Image (spheres, coloured by chain):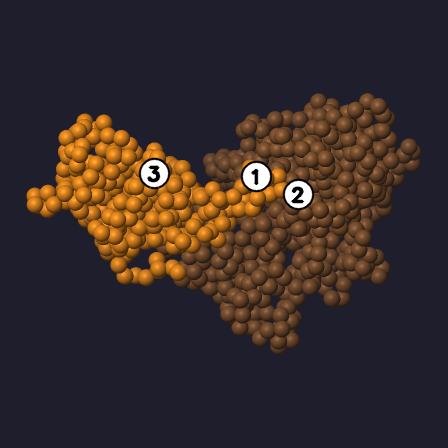
Amino acid sequence: MTDTLPPQEKVHGLMINSDLSQGPFYIDGMDTTPKLLRLRCQTLGNRTAHREKTFGIWRSHSWNDYFTRAKHLGLGLLSLGLQRGEVVSILSEDSKEWMYTDMGVQCVGGICSGVYTTDSASQLEYLVNNSDSRFLFVENDEQLDKFLQVRDNLPDLAKVIVMDREGLHGFTDPQIIFLDELYDLGAAYDAANPQAFDAGIDATKPEDTAILVYTSGTTGKPKGAMISHGNLMYSVAAGLRDAPTFDTDDQLCFLPLCHILERVFSVNAPIAAGSTTNFAESPETIFDNLQEVSPQTFVAVPRLWEKIYSQVAIRIGDATGVQKWAYAQALKAGGARAACLAEGKPLPFGANLAYRFWDLALLQNLRRMIGMDRLRRGGSGAAPISPELLQWYHAIGVPVLEGYGMTESSGVICINCDDTNKIGTVGRALPGAEIRISDEGEIQYKAGNVFQGYWKNPEKTAETFTEDGWLRTGDVGMLDNQGFLKITGRLKDIIITAGGKNITPAEIENKLKFSPYISDVVVIGDKRKFLTCLVMIDQENVEKFAQDRRVPFSNYASLCAAPEVQDLIRETVEEVNKDFARVEQIKDFRLIDVLLTADDDELTPTMKLKRSFVETKHAELISQMY
Amino acid sequence: MNTQNTKADVVLQIDNLESYYGPIMAIRGVSLKVHEGQIVTVLGANGAGKTTLLKTISGVMDPEKGTVTMEGTDIQSMEPDAIVRRGIVHVPEGREIFPLMTVAENIAMGAYTRKDRSGIAADEEMVYSYFPILKDRRNQRAGTLSGGQQQMLAIGRGLMSHPKLMLLDEPSLGLSPLLTQEIFEIIVRLNKEQKVTMMLVEQNAKVALDAADYGYVMELGRIVMNDSADVLAASKDIQEFYLGVSQDENQRGQRRWKQRKTWR
């Protein structure tokens, strides 16, 4: 079949292209994820592929189970009439079934598109219709109800498959079947056509679209980014060199799989590496699950890294004097060691001894407490992270490295790695990738993981590429002389004040967000006389602040209204203002006094504020300031 | 309309209260106010910290942090009997009457902190006027009363200390809907006629909100929502989680899952 592979080399145990600037990209001789999955399932057989917690117990599922489930699911869809190149949508929290659906669909030539469980019925309607989905998988009765609300507007949908029967016993509907019924259909189809699944896998080509990933779309409707098998193979292969995963590794999957970052990290990378994916029970239990799994590699968003840090900080705040002293000493020793490592200098004997002592006495317990005692590499992406926070993690012996990517680059563009980590930058371009900075300062990118375009949206696709075919990231940044990329903001977010001054709000916002009391912030000021901002406070830390200072409050709104809290934020703003020129200083601010959840329009599923929604929804607050 | 913000006539003020059972933090920073003449209710599921809150107010438990102020005086470190003398009486969950004593003796126990004989006699008559059934059973052992009568006795016993503020812990517990209604009617009458300010902890949100002027909702040791009782009763989250009103009927005609709480 593939008789002439481009030159290959072994990287961390896997064979990949020596030259990653040219496709097709191979991993162990396979050029698509379905082919690679088949190979892994054949060789790893009964070893554990993933674990899921049921009734409080982590249960293991083998690579054989994985393959059988994906096969029966894919063939079940074939028997119901799925054609190659058609789209299947999935509306579910992360689960092993999510992964079976993803791979089952791709193995028979379909395209898998994820829908966030926080999306409303009307958003579901748009996503199903826009993607021309033929099938829809829903997690349970709650998600099914969203479909039922809008079913009359979904004419092209052939069948809906419900994964969890709970609460739906006795429910029947000609358009709806349950997942176990689909497995049965697939098993029957397999018995009648034993070659069908292999044929489906063999027919996958690197240039075929594998998945659709809808971008949150702060302006206008969401757009479906088409990501090919080749794109995903490149992301995984190119990430391998600097961020290896091994077949003995445990990973923890908790961000929505609809998000490209978790998809590549928890579905595609484990198929390449043979590592074990553990599904967190829910976003609320993530800290417990981290302790239980203690992963070797872990990727999260800055918000989670911040949360872990604040939990430790809060516990230290309540500790005894001796404990506080010990913690400070341990951090000092860890910080000294981290600084030496970062500069590539050898660690002086005394500093090494101090670190070893404090590591044994305190730091290793701390790491165990936060579930990071086995962590080899922690990744942070999807939003900027505070350098101080990264330094703290390095000091306690947890290497957290920042990376950068976007949906349109199949998740990754840059990553930092252990031996060449530069805090404050997002690292260097992946092997084989090129980055350039346009005259406007925009980061432009060219590599094997640049997406194919937006589904049925050639105009938007054209806008996303330069005339000479580079991906326009929409981010502003700079490259240093060693090739490290530093992001300064979003191009379209640039504020032009009434005075005509161009301001990159992200620079100010990031500085503000480094405060433990500020969860997120949006700087306002386009076409206005001066800058202001809307602040979303960090509930836990501000509550703690209020408690410690005996500031009375009852609920979230009264917490935001407390004069002491207002002063706290004002001090932070004034502190940050010192770093900026007069025109870039924040003159006033307001707190958003409703506790936002992922269900709200103003927040992305990764809990970031969406500028345009915030500006329209809180126009009242903004007008108070001008 | 938020009447809770005015400074005047605050009977009880709690600021940043934290209480522990050993290492378990049961109250995580609660602040609230009770105004004179009001019925204030604290709603919440099992384990929300409601009973702990009442126990901390009445001095049965000492808080780790925070203050409890009664008419301007800190009372959080006082002994329970001193707090009763200041005018706070706690009617505990599950009544906790003295089962082997007679009804009359139980009521007399309520006046333990008082010395004025004539006043005590008058108050006994007052209690019997609100709960005539207790008068009929005055010589009967309290343990032989029905649940509803025991609850009446517990409230009556509480009244005997002539309280300014009565802390009621789940008066509806184990009572039939009819008896619950009867007890609540008396609570409202006592509030109106005897000017007893009430702080009422309840799981039965419907009766509590009907009777109360103002309400707090507790979850996991924190207050997540507070407003006047009418506003609370109209809130989507309260309706779904406490009043059992199903919001929108769906296509299937049945629903098992719950919406997410937002407390707005």
Please, what secondary structure does the residue beneath circle 3 have?
A: helix
The residue indicated by pointer 1 is B255
The residue at 32%/61% (across/down) is B6
Q: Position of residue B192 (x, y in %)?
A: 25, 52
In percent of width and height, residue A77 lies at 78, 34
In terms of depth relative to the viewer, which is nearer, B146 or A280?
B146
- The answer to whether marks 1 and 3 sit on the same chain is yes
Mark 2 surroundings: few (<14), some (14-19) or many (≥20) residues within 10 A:
few
Query: On the image, which quarter does residue A253 sit in?
Result: top right
- For disc 3, the marked residue is B178
Residue at 49% in and 38% down: A366
> Which tint is chain B?
orange
- A352 left or right of A261? left
Distance from label 1 to label 2 (Cα)? 12 Å
Q: Are marks 1 and 3 in contact (CB under 8 Å)?
A: no
Earlier along the polypeptide chain: callout 1 or callout 3?
3
Figure colour of chain A: brown
